[in-house]
Image (cartoon, rainbow, N blue to C red):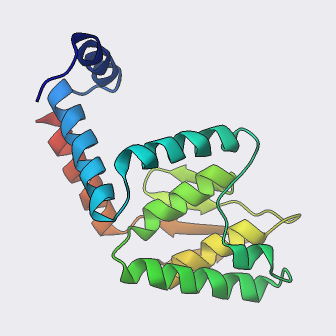
Amino acid sequence: MGLDEDLAEELREIAKLRGMSIASYMRKLISSALELEKMGYFAPKALEDKKLEIVLATFNFAYIPLDLVNSDGSIDKIRVLGEMIGAALKEMGMDIYSIIEYIGSSTKTIISHGDRIVIVPTPNNPTISELVKGIARGGGLEIQESGGLAIINMPKTTMEKIKSLIDKELE
């Protein structure tokens, strides 16, 4: 497989900035693209969509289920919706902890702290934090709630996956 010299140099610089070798960076890039293709997505289109998502995030856009937009705001209904989403994602074999981290980070409703996530109370608009709690419950994660805070500990499987990825990167 050949690359133009200018592209290869740019990739080398990016890999170096990420603390990776060019080979490990390319392996990660290509394996991620293959995962998308296996899911039926055209990988270059997915990257373009992500670029759009990043731009929209600067205007506080976030992905939320349409059922949430049409909801009457009932906390119970929001949690049930989250539980249904969490159960479906778990059934699909998705990493619920990482999804919660993604949603919470993009909506600024969580603090990721090492091996746990703290869901920040949002008294003026509890919608997203309640949805995230529901997703965690539906996905089979344990939640500890106390004094308005909710804490989700990282599952051992996620911790092992991260350790494995780190080990691979160090090869």
Residue 103 visible in image: yes
Callout count:
0
Q: Is residue 39 above or below residue 85?
A: above
Residue 121, by quadrant, is bottom right
Residue depicted at x 64% and y 60%:
63
Q: Quadrant of residue 35?
A: bottom left
Q: Residue at x 51, y 50 (%)?
A: 113
Q: Position of residue 160 (x, y in %)?
A: 24, 60
Q: Residue at x 56, y 86 (%)?
A: 84
Residue 167 lies left or right of residue 162; in this view the side is left
For the point 56% across and 76% down, the residue is 135
Which one is nearer the viewer's eye here, 24 or 32? 32
Quadrant occupied by the C terminus:
top left
Is 90 in front, or is 152?
A: 90
Above or below 13: residue 52: below
Task: Please state which of residues 92 and 110 is positioned toward the viewer in this rendering.
Answer: 92
Q: Nearer the viewer, residue 35 or 45?
A: 45
Residue 47, horizontal then vertical, whole percent = 44, 43
Q: Quadrant of residue 161?
A: bottom left
Residue 115 location, x and y as percent?
Answer: 43, 56
Quadrant of the image for the N terminus? top left
Q: Is residue 87 left or right of residue 19?
A: right
Answer above or below: position of 75 versus 119. below
38 relative to 26, above or below: below
